[in-house]
Image (spheres, coloured by chain):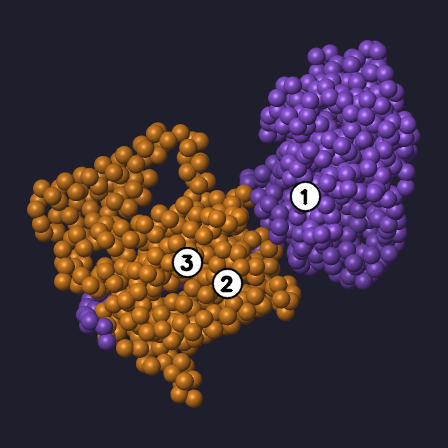
Amino acid sequence: MLKIENKADIFHYRTLLFVLVLSILTLLSRYFYLQVIEHERYSSKSQVNSVRAQATYAPRGLILDRNGVVLVENYPTYILTVTPHELDNKEAQFQIISDITDIPIDELSRRYKKYNQGRFLPTVIAKNLTFAEISQIEERRLELSGFQYKRFDERLYNDILKDAHFLGYLRELDRESIPFLDKSQLYRAGELIGWQGLEKQYETELRYSKGIEYIEVDTFGREINTINDNNIPAYPGKNLTLSIDSKLQQFSKNLLFNQKGVILVSNVDTGDILSMVSIPSYNLDIYRGETTDSDWSNLLSDEDKPIINRNIAGLYPPGSSFKIITAFNLIEYGLLDPEDSLMCTGSYIPPGSSNTFNCWNEDGHGLVDLNKAIAQSCNVYFYETVQLIKLSDWTKTAKIFGFQNKTDIDLPNELIGQIPDKEFFINTYGRWGWSERGVLLNLTLGQGDILVTPLQSLRYINHIASKGKTAKLKLNANKKVEYYDDIILSDQTWDRVIKGLYDVVNAEGGSGWRAKQSEVKLYGKTSTAENPHGEPHAWFNGFFDFEGQTYSLVILVENGGGGGAVASPIAGEIVRFFTNEQVEMVYK
Amino acid sequence: MTFFNNYIYGSNEYLGRLYLIVSSLITFGLITLYSISSDPLSINSSFMRQLIFIIFSLFVFFILNQINVKTIHDNSTLIYIISFLLCFVPFFLTPVENTYRWIDFGFFYIQPGEYLKCATIILIAKYLSNHQLEVKEGYIVFIPILIALLSSFLVLNQPDLGTAVIIFAPVLPMMLWAGVNGFTLFLLIAPVITIIAASNNMFFNIWGVLMFIIFMTFQGSLLKRVLIYFANIFTGLLFPFFWNDFLNGYQRQRFIDFLNPDLDPMGSSYHIIQSITAIGSGGMFGKGWGQGSQTQLKFLPVQESDFILSVIAEEFGFFGITVIMFLFFMLIKTLLDIAFKSSDYFSSLVIIGLTSILFSHIFVNSAMTIGLMPVKGLPTPFVSAGGSFMLLCFIILSLVSNLSKN
C-alpha cells in the first residue's frame, strides 16, 4: 500500500531475538537465584523477623511572643494504636480497652474505621491516656496483642493567651485529606497538622521532620531488635517568634470588659502586630483531647460567633473614618480649596430632592472648613463636597488604600470585605434603582454597602501614618519587612489629612478628645457606624509616635455606641500602656 | 460476527496471538491488584480504577483502530508537533509533586511525555523509510538522533529522567532494522559504555582493550579509527575528573536532585531490600494469593505500579514469575514476528520502535525490583496500575494492529 516494501533482514530479526532471550534469561536467572537458591534465607527473614519501619517524632516548634514568652508549647500525652492484622479477637479486645479507658466501644470502632490505613499499619484509637490506664494495658498485655501505646505530643496554650484566635489549632489528619498535602512531609492519618491560624500558616516551619527507625519484629509484632544502620533521626520543628506582645494583648483584652469587639495595635514602621484581640473568643484547649459533640455544636451555633477571628473575618461598616477617603479625593484632585468654609446648619437637603440628611450635631457646626470637618466629623461638609467626586474615583481611592483586598497578613482565611462600585449597584438595585449622587451620600460616611475588616482598617491608618510607604502587616517577628504598593499623593494632601487627624484628638471640639494624652501626640479618627444589629459600632483608628517609632491602633466595640464616647477612651488607655514607666522597658 | 472475529483472531495469525497474550497479562495484573487492595470493590481501589482504565483504553483502542496507516505515515510530522506541544501544557499548570509531567483530568492524570515517545518513533520511522537508499552511509544516523535528542531534552526539563532515557531505547533497534552498518552503531554506543566503565578501573581496562580490538576489525581509514578510539578513551578518563573535581558536592547534589525530584526521602535502598525480601521469600510456588505478608506491609509505596512484580513474585513464587516472563517474551517475540512479516517498510520500523519501548519498560522495571538497576518509576506494560501508561499500551497495540493489516 505504501511506497516501500519491507526488506527486513532475517539476521536483524535474529539479533533482536537474541537480545530478548538473553535479557529475559538474565532476569529469570536472578529471580531463580533469589527465589529458589536463596529462598531459605529470605523466607526465614520474612517469617521469623520482619523489618518494620517506624516513624519517630520530635517536638513541634514552639510559638513565642516578641519577648520570648512561650505562648504555645507541647504537652506529652499517651496514645493507643492498634495494628489490624495482629488482633486476635477484635470484639473482646476492644471490650477490654473500653473497660480500661471508659471510651464506649462504638467510639473505638468508629475511630478504628476512620483512621485505618491498612492491615499492617498501626491506627490511633485512643488519646490522652493516663498513666494508670497505661499500667493497666501493660498488665494485660498478653490479651492485647496488636495494641501499642506511645508518646504523642499535644499543644499546650499559655493561660493568658489561650483564647487568641490567631494562634490557630492542630487537627488530626484523616485519610481523605492526605492526598492534598505536601508529600515530602510524610503525613499519616491520625497525626496532627496545623489546621487554622498561625499553626496552619507556618505548618512547614513548625512541623518536626519525621525520622525513620527500622526495627525487627517477630510474627507477633514484638520488637526484637533495632537496626541502626539506616535510621533517619527526627528533628524538632522551628520555633516561631511572634511580633505580639502578650502583656499588651492581655492589657487590651481587659479594656474591652467582655464587650464584643476588636483591638489591634501595630508598629507602623515594621508592620509588626503587637496586639490582636477579638472578643468573644473561646478556649483553644477545646481542640485538645476529646471534645463532646454537644460542646462543639454549642460553640458553632453561638450567635456571637466566638469561633471567628473578627480581625480578619469580621465585616463591619467603617463609618466616618471613610470621610478621609473623600478628603483625599478633594485635596489631591484640587476639587476645592481646603481653606474654604461652608455652613453646616445641622442638616442637608440634596439639590432636587426632598429628603433631609442630618448631621450628627443637629445644632449644626456653623462655618466648617476641611480641617474642622475632619476634626469634628461634620456630615454636612462631606455631604456637600462628595458631590464633586465621581463614584468611580471615590471607589478607586478606597481600593488604593487596601480595601476589598487582602492585607497579606500571615494568617489563612482572611476576608476582603466589599467596596461597592457601579457594577455592584446595578446588580443589587437595578439600573435605575439608584443614583450616583445618592449612594455617595452614604459612602462618604462609610455606611451603606461598604464592609471592611478591622485589619484592613489598620492597614488604612498605617498608610496614612507612613504617608503611603507602608510595611505589610505581619505576626511573625522574624519575617522580612515587605511593603505594600506605594500610595503616591502630594505632601500637601498627606499633611492636610494628618493635621485633621491631629485635631480630632487634640483640638477643641474634636470628636476624639477623650483619647488625648499629654506625653505623646495621638492622631486618629472616630467612627460611629450605624448597622442593622442594634446600637452603632464604635471605632477609633489612630496612630502615635513613641520613642522614634510610629504605632497605630484600631479599636472597635461592636454595638458599643459612639466612637468618640466609647472607643476613644480605650485608645487613650492603650497609649498610656506605652508611656507607663513599668512597661516602657519592654520596648527598649 | 466478522467484526468480532477480526479483532479476536486478527487479520493475521500473529495478531490473534498478540491479543491472547495481552489479555493474559492484563488478567494477571488485575488478579494481583485485587490481592493488594484492602477494599477491592471500592471505586478508589487500585483494582477498580485499573478496571475502569482498561475499559476506557479499550474504547480508545477501537477508535484508533479505524485510522488508516497511510494517514499516520503522511501526518507523522504533524503528530510529532502536536505531541511535542502537548508536553508544554503541564508547564502552565500547577506542578504535580514538584514536576511538570502531568495533565490532571480529575479522575486520572495524563503524561504527555508518554505519547511523545510514540510520535518520536513514527517520525524516525518515516525518515528512515524515506531514505532507505542512504542507510549504508554513516550520516544517516544524525537525523534520528537529533529527533530523539529534541524529545528527550524537552522531557528532561519536566523533569523526567526515566522517560528521557526510554525515548532513546528505540533508536538503536530501529537503525539496526533499517540496515545501518554495525560500525556506525558501535560508534554510537561506545561513548556511553566508556563513561559507565570509567567508574571502575578494571572495567575500564577491559573495555579499553575490547574496544581496541573491535575498532581494528572494522574497515575504513586507520587514522580515523585510531582518532575515534582515543577520543573515546579520553572521554572516559575525563568524565570522573569532571564529575568529582570540576563540580563541587553541592552542584552534584543539585544535578542529582534535578534528575530525581521524586527521589524517595526514606532512601530507595530500603525499598530494594523490602522488594528482594518479598521476592526471595516467595520461593518456588509463592505464599498464595493475598497471603504476601511482606508486600502487604505497604512499605513499598508504589507496589501497585513500580513494584507489582515483587507482589507477583511473593504471592505466586518463581512459578508465577516464569509464567509472566514467558508472557513478556511471547509478547515481544510476537511483535518482532509481526514486524518481520509486515509487507510495508514504514510499518515494520514503527512496530520495532514500539516494541523497543515496551521491552525497555519490562526490562528496567523487572531489573529494578531485583536490585539490578536503580529505582526509577517505570511501570510494567499491561500489568502495573496506572491510567496514563495503560492507555499508552493500548495505543501501541492499536498502532501495531493497524500497521499489520497490510
Q: Position of residue A555 (x, y in %)?
A: 82, 29
Label 2: which secondary element: helix
Q: Which mark is residue B380?
A: none
Label 1: which secondary element: loop
The chain letter for the residue carrying disc 2 is B
What residue does disc 3 label? B114
Q: Are marks 1 and 2 in contact (CB under 8 Å)?
A: no
- The residue at the point 56 percent across, 53 percent down is B301
What residue does disc 2 label? B387
- The residue at the point 74 percent across, 59 percent down is A113
* Relative vertical location of residue A98 with respect to residue A164 in this rendering, above or below: below
Q: Which chain is purple?
A: A
Label 3: which secondary element: helix
Q: Position of residue A170 (x, y in %)?
A: 74, 42
- Observer-nearest residue: A111 or A475? A475
Amino acid type at image mark 3: Glu
- Observer-nearest residue: A179 or B321? A179
Q: Are marks 3 and 2 in contact (CB under 8 Å)?
A: no
Sooner in the amino-acid sequence: mark 3 or mark 2: 3
Q: CA distance from mark 3 to mark 1?
A: 50 Å
Q: Which mark is residue A421?
A: 1
The chain letter for the residue carrying disc 1 is A
Q: CA distance from mark 3 to mark 2?
A: 11 Å
- Colour assignment, chain B: orange
Question: Of the residues tagged 3 and 1, which is closer to the observer?
Answer: 1
Q: Position of residue A282 (x, y in %)?
A: 85, 39
Label 3: few (<14), some (14–19) or many (≥20) C-alpha neighbours in 10 Å: many
Q: Is residue A132 left or right of residue A461?
A: right
